[in-house]
Amino acid sequence: MPTAIVTGGAIRIGRAMALHLAGKGFDIALLYHSSETTETIAEIQAQGVQCRGYAADLRKLDEAEAFIGKVLQDFKNVELLVNSAANFIQENIEQTQVETLVDTLNLNLMAPYLLMREYKRKVNKGLIVNILDERVARTVPTFAAYSVSKVALQHLTELAAVEWGETVRVNGIAPGLILPPEGAPPDYMEKGNVRSQGTLDDLLKALGYLMENKHVNGETLFVTH
Ligand SMILES: NC(=O)c1ccc[n+]([C@@H]2O[C@H](COP(=O)([O-])OP(=O)(O)OC[C@H]3O[C@@H](n4cnc5c(N)ncnc54)[C@H](OP(=O)(O)O)[C@@H]3O)[C@@H](O)[C@H]2O)c1
């Protein structure tokens, strides 16, 4: 059976992707940080595939660098990496704390960078999907460090696709609003400058397209309108 690695796989979008991939017959290596994973892992295993959770703090780059090697000790046939873990901190440039800047760039950009590099070095086949944000194409003046991290991750996606040809395809999915942040106020849609809300199913269809179409490389699929 092929294996998919999903970061941020314990909750929300990452979890939906992990469950979806399990339904397609993938064993799942699920990276989590602080979430309880027992139920999610049981739900994945109930689909008749293997699933193992790996705790890591991707703000720590040594943990990011070691992760693919750890997975390969347990799963031999890795074919897919989904980089979904990210933070989303609402500070504009003027408000940005040093801690926000460092954590955001480490978690949302440098960790995927190192995961991709290790995937190329150690797996060297299949597909990487980086979860971006529609903000890579829209200049929205909040979540500044987050926006910068996602724009850079999109560039990295394109760069890796060119560098690696088609040994490892690398694509991005750029969602608009799918799930409001936990604890978001009722007026989040208006205040967050959101035009419309998509569904998890819209995202899963985008993932399916990138998996099935082996001739798509270096693209960003926007799931928003
Ligand atoms: N929600 C949306 O509508 C939306 C829109 C556009 C783009 N996106 C993108 O889609 C992806 C998923 O979004 P989401 O809303 O589902 O995210 P979320 O609910 O904020 O979850 C964040 C995920 O990142 C993981 N994470 C946080 N800090 C971590 C750390 N230090 N080390 C390792 N993992 C860490 C969390 O793991 P634990 O739970 O285990 O701590 C969690 O699984 C993100 O890349 C986001 O930028 C989402």
Image: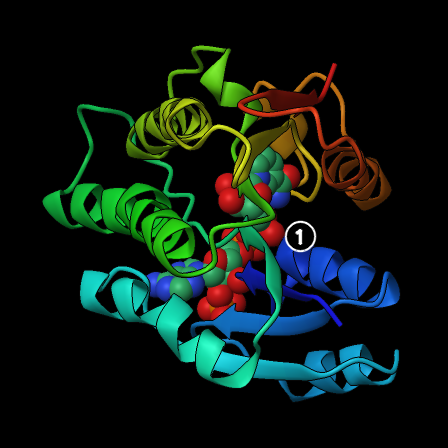
Q: Residue at x 57, y 78 (%)?
A: 75
Task: Provide residue 62's location: percent of width, then percent of height.
Answer: 19, 67
Task: Provide residue 53's location: percent of width, then percent of height.
Answer: 55, 81
Q: Is residue 94 above or below residue 206?
A: above
Q: Residues within 10 Å of mark 1 (few under 14, many from 20)?
A: many
Q: Please indicate, yes or no, whether residue 182 appears anywhere in the rendered image.
A: no
Q: Quadrant of the N terminus?
A: bottom right
Q: Nearer the viewer, residue 225 or 29?
A: 29
Answer left or right for 110 relative to 97.
right
Q: Which residue is mark 1?
A: 13
Where disc 1 sits, the SS reads helix
Q: Quadrant of the C terminus?
A: top right
Q: Residue at x 87, y 65 (%)?
A: 23
Colouring:
rainbow
Answer left or right for 75 relative to 24.
left
User: Mark 1: is the Cβ under 8 angstroms from ligand 1?
Assistant: yes
Q: Nearer the viewer, residue 155 or 39?
A: 155
Q: Is residue 68 above or below residue 82?
A: below
Q: Please indicate, yes or no, whether residue 65 appears anywhere in the rendered image.
A: yes
